Image: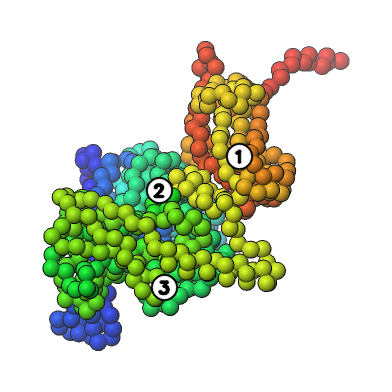
Amino acid sequence: MPTTSENAIVLKSIGKSFRILGDKRARMLDALGLRLPNRSLQEFWALRDVDLVIPRGQRIGFIGRNGAGKTTLLKIISGLLRPSTGTVNVSGRVHALLELGTGFHPEFSGRQNVLSALSYLGVTGREAESLCEYIVDFAELDQFIDRPFRTYSAGMQARLTFSVATSIKPEIMIVDEILGAGDAYFTGKAVARMKQLTSGGCTLLFVSHDMSAVQMMCERAVWIDRGGVREDGDTLTVGKLYAAAIRQQEELRLRSQALALRNDDTGAELGGDKDPEPLVIGRLVIAGDQPPQRAHAVHELALRYNGQDLERVKIGGARDDDRSERFFLIQQDGYTNWSRPRGSSRVRSRAFEDRKGRYRHAPFAFRAPIGLANWNEFELEVAHSADSREAVSVEIFAKDAYRTLGQLAGGEGQRSDRFALPRELFEEWRVRQERAVAGAADAGAEAPPTHGGLDVLKNVVEGDAYGSGEAVITALKVTGNAAAFNAENQHVFTIGEPFSVAIEWRAFAPIDDVAFVVAIYTEDGRCATQTLSRAQDLEKGPGRVLADFGPLRLGEGKYVISVGMFRGLRESDTHGEQPIAVLDRRHVLKVMKPPGVRIDLGQFSHPVTWQTVKAAVES
């Protein structure tokens, strides 16, 4: 029966928790229905405080790292999981493609599985036979359709699963990464099929780690991070923020790996992996290591560098104690003095209070970004509503002892305090760096970079810049005048108008074999055109280069421009593996048709010379 609601899905304060039992004894007691000691039971909140409204017919992409909570959220929407908190209102029939082969029997043939699935959807008899042939034709599995499903490759399973799910027009369709198993040819068919469905009013929820696929398919993107919605907006804006965050984390990880460091004993105790970034332990504590007499609410903890967040955790939110994250609190009933999460979806917190914890404090930890060399630019931020009637100290463990950073400021309402990290901690990091550099030199390897370029991570954190740090791009000029380096940036051009891109940079040391790149992308993430310069050696200091395109040949539409400097990049390479400095999708460009032109000129305005040629005279 058709639905009339303008919203297909409405989620309010959705949360999902899972119980984690500590040992076999606890699992046995739980199976028998007996009460468990608090220290044997942990709650893992995969989602918390998720609010979403999805209008009917919208194409929405969900992005986020593995384990962020995307699949859990989609399972709640599809009815496979019940939320622990909040309400779910879904208006319409849902088809969910969450896993390869879901609902298909491995011993049945492909045809038998198709007919079985259609029967479940209420299609039988001649209609099912006819629809089955359409499905087989779309999946292009003619010679395999009567073989057992278990013999199919992952790509073949994806083809058949998708073809069945889209054979009957769903009102809400959920696709979670399964198309990644298919080949590029079928993925193109699937994208066209999903666009056809959504043009007819179907609501699409699409999960992918491929941002270009999200941009191509969806008009809206939701970034799920640590079990909550971090960003929600148009695909280009959200995609840029997500890509910048991933680059930042990868940059920190690679800088530490370059130092060839090992994890310390503290990390091993806390379940750390072999990540070379050592764990730094901090805590909130009362003088004399006494239990608190008041309740001190803490809302957020953040590690900052050069005035920008490296990592921020919302205390009381989902996964605030997830030890796989860069920053997390350490919560264990019976041992620490963090309370359970409190407050509403808008103002979450945990309290540092007397929970009879053995260690009397409220600890937290973060992975040290020791690949960054500007020691004076690190600080710890604590957003809190601490009770001013009791002094709460913030401490960091360094050189075998806790070092006091300061005290939380008293006052009314929520406030934030920032503390510089102690000199003793940086001395530990510096020793690790020097040891790694010396080890690399002894082995005849290239030492990890320690030049001033390390201090430009601020550019990375700002959202759309990344690179090795050997140089920075200081200016990008897009103009209609190739000679005007000082001209104002221009965003609107007409087809055929002069078009040039100027790049200004500063190198912190001589750099050899550098190629400059200008790439222009369409709104859906596809590369419209890309050009690179011949490689050249750069001297230390400032410089500039100009890409003169001549008359602009791009068709009508909106575009975004990226520029970069790469070491060793050639046209024979598939992509730049050694970025020195990149400004990703920094400049927005709008191309319009010339005045008076109404006919569609296409995606590219190719120069054409027309000639009138007389026909050959018949003899």
Q: Secondary structure at mark 2?
A: loop
Q: Quadrant of the C terminus?
A: top right
* CB under 8 Å between discs 3 and 1: no
Q: Quadrant of residue 103?
A: bottom left
Q: Amino acid at mark 2?
A: Gly
Q: Note whether 378 is above or below 268 in the view shown.
A: above
Query: At numbered mark 1, what does the secondary structure look like: helix, strand or loop?
Result: strand
Q: Earlier in the sequence, mark 3 or mark 1?
A: 3
Question: Dividing the picture into quarters, in which one does residue 448 lie?
Answer: bottom right
**Of callouts 2 and 1, which one flags the residue occurring earlier in the amino acid sequence?**
2
Q: Which image quarter: residue 332?
A: bottom left
- Number of labels in the image equals 3
Neighbor class of circle 1 (other Cα within 10 Å; few <14, some 14-19, many 20+) is some
Packing grade of label 3 (10 A; few <14, some 14-19, many >=20) is few
Q: Indicate the position of residue 167 as horizontal and vertical percent values.
A: 39, 50
Disc 3 marks which residue? 399
Q: Give the residue at mark 1.
A: 505
The dot on residue 307 is: 2
